[in-house]
Image (cartoon, rainbow, N blue to C red):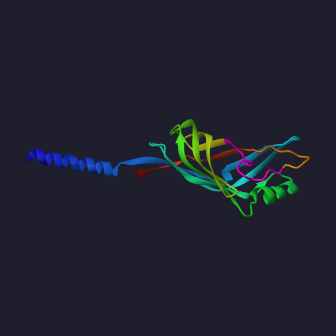
């Protein structure tokens, strides 16, 4: 009888602990004022530099399991290189930004581990959407978490011509069929929350 009672009590305790088990999550808020998205496109004469503006971004990372979710959205209509005629052509003929106003990345997996402080280098896999098409992509990201802030930098290449986006090359001017993207973001030390496992 006593043994039965002890077994029942132990089972109840284990179930209670299991149901209340929680795992810490770090929430990274990407703010337009603290995020830069720049691009570099090479041609036979010189290199073209430009930038886009961030619309919004929020990424949740599970510090225990490494699971990741969220979305980062860039305003395609904000793209500019500083030369009006070239930018108008980019928006009308290449990006078709009036029709496809968003460029987004939705992470779904992290190779490597982000530490609770200091520098971490990881590979973030996810879905990259541009010009209405979805593409799998892995982006190398360096995350630095300090006591009062965090920074994240990423560099990747978009093979836009391979993905069916028009190459703006002309008979005279030839440009690369891929464009390099650099992202840098920062914010306050990510808020850590507990979520049910």
Residue 174, by quadrant, is top right
Residue that appears at 70% across and 61% down: 101
Q: Nearer the viewer, residue 158 or 54?
A: 158
Quadrant position of residue 150: top right
| x and y percentages locating residue 129 in the rendered image | 65, 54
Q: Position of residue 28 (x, y in %)?
A: 56, 49
What are the residue bounds of the magenta stretch?
A: 155-168
Magenta stretch prevailing secondary structure: loop
Residue 147 part of the magenta-drawn span: no
Q: How many marks?
A: 0
Task: Answer left or right for 80 relative to 14.
Answer: right
Q: Nearer the viewer, residue 7 or 148?
A: 7
- Residue shown at 57% from the left, 44% from the top: 125
Identify the residue at the far bottom of this view.
Answer: 98
Q: Nearer the viewer, residue 85 or 60?
A: 85
- Left or right, 171 with respect to 160, comes to right
Relative to residue 94, is residue 3 depicted above or below?
Answer: above
Q: At 79% across and 54% down in the image, what residue appears? A: 80
Residue 145's x, y, as percent? 56, 40
The x, y position of residue 183, in whole percent, is 68, 45
Q: Is residue 164 magenta?
A: yes
Q: Residue furthest left?
A: 1
């Amino acid at each position: 009888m006593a043994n039965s009672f002890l077994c029942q009590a132990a089972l109840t305790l284990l179930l209670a602990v299991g149901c209340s088990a929680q795992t810490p999550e770090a929430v990274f808020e990407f703010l337009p004022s603290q995020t830069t998205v720049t691009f570099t496109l090479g041609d036979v004469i010189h290199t073209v530099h430009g930038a886009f503006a961030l619309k919004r971004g929020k990424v949740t990372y599970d510090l225990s399991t490494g699971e990741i979710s969220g979305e980062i959205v860039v305003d395609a209509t904000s793209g500019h290189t500083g030369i009006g005629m070239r930018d108008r052509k980019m928006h009308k003929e290449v990006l078709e930004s009036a029709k496809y106003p968003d460029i987004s990345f939705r992470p779904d997996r992290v190779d490597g581990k982000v530490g609770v402080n200091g520098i971490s280098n990881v590979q973030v896999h996810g879905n990259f959407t541009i010009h209405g098409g979805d593409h799998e992509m892995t982006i190398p990201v360096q995350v630095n978490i300090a006591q009062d802030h965090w920074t994240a930098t990423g560099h990747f290449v978009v093979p836009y011509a391979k993905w069916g986006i028009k190459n703006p090359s002309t008979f005279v001017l030839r440009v690369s069929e891929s464009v390099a993207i650099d992202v840098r973001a920062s914010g306050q030390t990510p808020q850590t929350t507990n979520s049910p496992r």
